[in-house]
Amino acid sequence: MNAQLKFRDLEMVVALQEEGTFTQAARRIGVTQTALSKRLQMVEREVQVRLFERTHGGAMVTGPGRMFVSDAVQILHTLQRAVHDAREARYGERQKLRIGVSLYLPPQLIALIHAVELPLYKQLAVEIVTGFSPELIADVQNKNVDVALVASPAPNAALTQQRIARDHFMIIFRPRHPLAGKQFVTLADIVAYPWVFFRRVTHPFLHDLILRRVEADYGPAKIMHFGTHVAQASAMLHNDSIIGWINPAGAELAVHQGFVCLPLMDEHIHMETHLVSLADNRSQLVSEFARKFVKCWEDRSMPQQLSLPIE
């Protein structure tokens, strides 16, 4: 490596390649876009190679740039590994990552947490905390957990939110229900029937969004019962006119019990799983885990199953 280059320069080019824009890369490493652009020009002069092609609002790594970034990643990992090894040897340090997990996440996502490998953190201890999504958001903001997997969080400037999955709500009813012959249902289909709906405390944002959407187009929803679990929801479907809201994982159990479950097709109402952390979190461990977790999820191309406030 040219003596004029610094490890900070390597962090910069890695961030730019991974983020794809000067804005995001500058925010990630804590500099201005102007400073990042000027430093990149200096690096390219030093190596005498154009590492990135500037695009409108972004940056695309060149062939030589890709090779440079690959080597830069290895150099940075070697340095970071050396620091961690020295600290572990001297102080017996053991890194700990606290991860919040929504109660209604599919098992595949939870299992994936333990499948993520972070070579820089050989002594990493992972602690999982479960709860409703609003509780986990508060835990992230209060720094009780480092990162959380939550269902459909409300917009929040204090948080970095990355969507990793999206799915439909599932509507459950008895086999003799008038909607039983359909392949899917819409709001227009279900508003005429009484509902078993999830309690607001489990997810205020989704609860209010759905009811506002229904009322704006069709009037107040006909909510007969409030439930939290599949067993409760199915038990409340005591006649052939009632419908209930459940998640995809719960739908499998409901079908096994003899109920019909259909996806709700609506442009505005759906479920999303987001990986969230504090926007001003500068932890390298949190950043590394988030990137590796999302990469593992994408590589596995798993079916997108999402959480619901009714299990």
Image (spheres, rainbow, N blue to C red):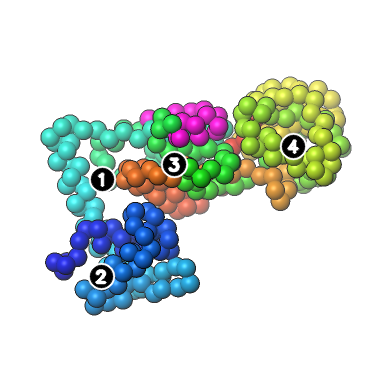
Q: Position of residue 285 (x, y in %)?
A: 32, 43
Label 3 sits on residue:
277
Left or right, residue 213 beside residue 289: right
Say above or below: 175 vs 78. above
Residue sitting at x 20%, y 61%: 6
Q: Amino acid at mark 1?
A: Leu
Left or right, residue 142 beside residue 92: right
Q: Amino acid at mark 2?
A: Val
In the picture, which quadrant includes the N terminus? bottom left
Foreground mark, 3 or 1, reads 3
Mark 1 Cα-neighbour bin, 10 Å: few <14, some 14–19, many ≥20? some
Label 1 sits on residue:
120
Mark 3 Cα-neighbour bin, 10 Å: few <14, some 14–19, many ≥20? many
Q: Amino acid at mark 3?
A: Ser
Give the spatial CA distance, label 2 vs label 3.
31 Å
Foreground mark, 1 or 4, reads 4
Query: Mark 1: which secondary structure?
Result: loop
Residue 61 falls in image quadrant: bottom left
Q: Is residue 133 magenta?
A: yes
Left or right, residue 126 beside residue 157: left
Give the spatial CA distance, label 3 vs label 1.
20 Å
Residue 62 falls in image quadrant: bottom left
Query: Mark 2: which secondary structure?
Result: helix
Q: Which mark is first along the chain, 2 or 4?
A: 2
Label 2 sits on residue:
43
Label 4 sits on residue:
211
Q: Nearer the viewer, residue 265 or 235?
A: 265
Q: Which mark is first along the chain, 1 or 3?
A: 1
Say above or below: 59 vs 82. below
Query: Mark 4: which secondary structure?
Result: helix
Give the spatial CA distance, label 1 vs label 4.
46 Å
Specify the segment rendered in magenta. Answer: 127-141
